[in-house]
Amino acid sequence: MGFLRWAQSWSGRWRVIATKVRPFAAYRYIRGHGIEIGALNDPLQTFHGAKVRYVDRLPTDKLRVAYPEIAGQPLVALDQVDDGEKLASIADASCDFVIANHVIEHVRNPIGAIENMFRVLKLSGILYLALPDKRFTFDAARAVTSYEHLKRDYLESPEWSEAEHYLDWITSVGKVTDASEAERRAKQIEAAAGDIHFHVWTQREFIELVLNLRRDFHWPIEIEAVLKNGQEFVVVLRKTDLG
């Protein structure tokens, strides 16, 4: 087989492998009873008889309005309506796992969201995350959200940075170059509480965030796995008894 044919063959095999990354990690780590946040039309495939309760911020009929691009597709049957960032209705230490795929980038306070996800986990429970790598998405032109920014969102409240995020979204993703028009549109989306990627990472910076949380806040986090998956990366974290 010539090199070109070999490369094309391997490229095709890699695309197949990439579609198996999420299920592979789920097979390895997801067991027992837990929740998936924001599954919409793409719930994680699970194994070993895992029991999943589906949680989202809006009832199904309102989710279809909020996400018109998937309005015609079947959505998971919701078990609970709750803010996935706060999980106020989920009891502490009640879940063997929490799944949140393409959720963290949408929340205003990622550290607070991760804290609450760990709050509801039992000891040795698993937090399963998939996040877009900003380099390979429409977020490519945006700067990675710094740890200092995320820490301020967590310690002070994310309200201080909300307008900045919407303006960044309009200029970097929406490609609006006129300053007054960009500001007008950013304020319009903010007033409507538009759902955007408030924060962006590459795989490296997100892992650095996790390590910083262990160092600065002594959170009981063990990194079990980090897997590249095309435009995204999958991170599996475990709640340990070591703060």
Image (cartoon, grey):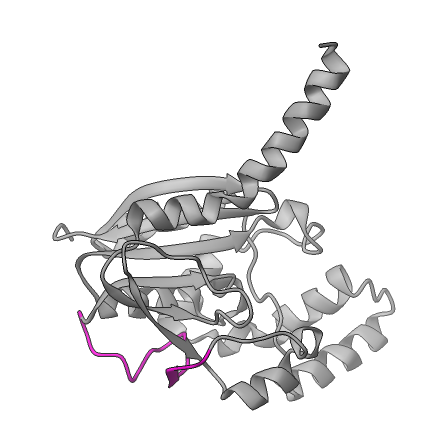
Picture quadrant where residue 74 is located: bottom right
- Which secondary structure is most common in the magenta stretch? loop
Q: Which residues are magenta?
A: 77-93
Picture quadrant where residue 197 is located: bottom right
Give the number of callouts.
Answer: 0
Residue 200 % position (x, y): 57, 56
Residue lying at the far right of the rendered structure: 178
Give the residue drawn at x 49%, y 70%. Answer: 107
Give the residue drawn at x 54%, y 51%. Answer: 201
| Vertical arrangement, residue 125 with respect to residue 117, above or below | above
From the image, which quarter does the N terminus lie in? Answer: top right
Q: Is residue 183 left or right of residue 236?
A: right
> Observer-nearest residue: 24 or 240?
24
Residue 202 % position (x, y): 54, 46
Residue 191 % position (x, y): 65, 88
Q: Is residue 89 left or right of residue 227?
A: left
Residue 193 % position (x, y): 61, 84
Residue lying at the far top of the rendered structure: 2
Inspect the magenta stretch and tell me whether residue 88 lies in it: yes
Give the residue drawn at x 33%, y 78%. Answer: 87
